[in-house]
Image (spheres, rainbow, N blue to C red):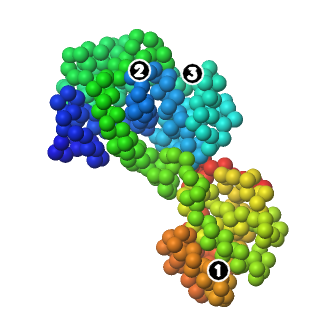
């Protein structure tokens, strides 16, 4: 193949062009109206990669809910943005939230737990899942129809669309899938053998392409959310970089008393955690300016929630200023601070303004607030729960 047709680079062996409409396949994700189109194709590719040759709408949608769970629940991502009155626009997001309402699943539940809950609460989920069958299974094929010059497509009739897909598959070109005669969630989805071979040969590349296009879509619809590329799958807790920050605060605790931001009680050297004021799941980094020593028992209670800005920001900034003073007054603390540069000091404003020598307390608190408050307010707008001690 000379050059990819898709919006991202997806290299498929030119031999497949002799039997399959690869060009239309690469246009399946072009200009979608809703995000669930990405999840539909992703679920199909995953099922084919596992050797599935025939499935149902129900099983594909179950895969979609599992794949969207972490982004919606753990990271508060809106899959297709919000409507003018703040309503959830995306049907898949509504399905995830409905399962949340019905079950006691945690935001970090495993795929097995999610699948079990979907089966357990199938009746309550039925309406939300059925809505996803109304359009996307058919609209997903729009690029094939357009490329063949099919001018009249009966989008408003499920029966006629099923017939159109069947006749198109036999008379024009092989489609990735055709549909059976059952209704709603029980409708059969049959994958074409030639498409199965191609997708199994290029599973990794195709999934990477879908992921790339999905991230671009989600970022456009969640412009205030930082680090969105990391918010599609569960994160490995081992990726957190808090070791040097803990050593820094240990050095501080040896020199002076530090009060817990939330209780006002002294932090005990052998019983505290390093935690984020604005949740890590939102900022997706371990920047020093957002980290604090915190009572271990309270940390699990705070979890993935935002502390009230008042009065807790003032106490947080007091501790941060104490740290700042010691960095510039004590050589040992300064060395521990320098050890944090690689993993915890990437924000340009922090290095050039916040931690520069010579700030008064008023200046320091103002700089910190000016940069933290917009991030905090973005998290509030994204739907993070406010935590009260």
Name the quadrant of the N terminus.
Answer: top left
Who comes first in sequence, dot 1 or dot 2? 2
Work out whether 260 lies above or below 147.
below
Q: Is residue 362 visible?
A: no
Residue wearing tag 3: 126
Q: Earlier in the sequence, mark 1 or mark 3?
A: 3
Direction top: furthest residue: 181
Q: Residue furthest right?
A: 265
Spot occupied by residue 298 in the image (x, y as percentages of width and height): 77, 57
Q: Give the numbered dot on residue 54.
A: 2
Q: Circle 1: is it few (<14), some (14-19), or many (20+) Cα within 10 Å?
A: many
- Of residues 163 and 120, the one drawn nearer to the viewer in this rendering: 120
Say whether disc 3 or disc 2 marks the residue closer to the N-terminus. 2
Q: Is residue 26 above or below residue 137?
A: below
Of 263 and 243, nearer the camera is 243
SS at badge 2:
strand
153, above or below 373, in the image? above
- The circle drawn on residue 324 is 1
Real-space CA distance between mark 1 and mark 2, rounded to the nearest whole angstrom = 62 Å
Can see residue 304? yes
Q: Secondary structure at mark 3?
A: helix
Along the line of sight, the residue nearer the viewer: 314 or 21 = 21
Total label count? 3
Relative to 170, is 329 on the left or the right?
Answer: right
Residue at 41% in and 28% down: 51
x 75%, y 52%: residue: 301
Alpha carbon of mark 3 to alpha carbon of mark 2: how far? Answer: 21 Å
- Which is in the foreground here, disc 1 or disc 2? 2
Residue placed at 67% from the left, 88% from the top?
330
User: Residue at the spot x=31%, y=23% of the render?
Assistant: 192
Query: Relative to 328, is 203 on the left or the right?
Result: left
């Amino acid at each position: 193949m000379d050059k990819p047709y898709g919006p991202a680079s997806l290299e498929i062996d030119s031999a497949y062009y002799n039997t399959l409409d690869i060009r239309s396949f690469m246009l399946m994700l072009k200009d979608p109206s809703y995000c669930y189109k990405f999840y539909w194709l992703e679920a199909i590719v995953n099922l084919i990669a596992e050797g599935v040759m025939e499935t149902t709408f129900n099983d594909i949608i179950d895969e979609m809910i599992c794949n969207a769970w972490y982004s919606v629940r753990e990271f508060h991502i809106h899959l297709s943005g919000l409507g003018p009155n703040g309503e959830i626009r995306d049907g898949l997001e509504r399905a995830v939230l409905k399962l949340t309402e019905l079950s006691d699943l945690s935001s970090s539940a495993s795929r097995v737990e999610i699948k079990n809950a979907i089966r357990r609460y199938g009746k309550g989920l039925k309406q939300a899942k059925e809505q996803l069958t109304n359009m996307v299974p058919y609209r997903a094929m729009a690029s094939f129809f357009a490329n063949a010059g099919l001018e009249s497509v009966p989008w408003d009739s499920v029966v006629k669309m099923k017939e159109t897909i069947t006749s198109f598959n036999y008379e024009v070109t092989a489609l990735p899938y055709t549909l059976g005669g059952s209704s709603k969630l029980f409708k059969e989805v049959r994958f074409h053998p030639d498409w199965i071979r191609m997708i199994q040969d290029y599973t990794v590349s195709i999934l990477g392409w879908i992921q790339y296009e999905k991230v671009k879509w989600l970022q456009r619809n969640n412009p205030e959310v930082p680090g969105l590329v990391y918010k599609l799958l569960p994160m490995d807790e081992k990726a957190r970089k808090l070791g040097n920050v803990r050593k820094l605060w240990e050095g501080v605790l040896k020199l002076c008393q530090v009060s817990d931001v939330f209780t006002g009680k002294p932090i005990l050297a052998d019983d505290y955690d390093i935690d984020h004021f604005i949740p890590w799941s939102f900022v997706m980094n371990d920047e020093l300016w957002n980290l604090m020593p915190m009572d271990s028992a309270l940390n699990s209670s705070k979890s993935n929630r935002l502390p009230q800005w008042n009065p807790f920001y003032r106490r947080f900034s007091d501790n941060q200023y104490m740290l700042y003073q010691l960095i510039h007054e004590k050589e040992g603390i300064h060395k521990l601070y320098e050890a944090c540069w690689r993993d915890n000091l990437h924000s340009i404003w922090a290095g050039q303004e916040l931690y520069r020598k010579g700030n008064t307390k008023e200046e320091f608190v103002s700089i910190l607030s000016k940069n933290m408050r917009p991030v905090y307010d973005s998290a509030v707008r994204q739907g993070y729960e406010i935590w009260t001690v």
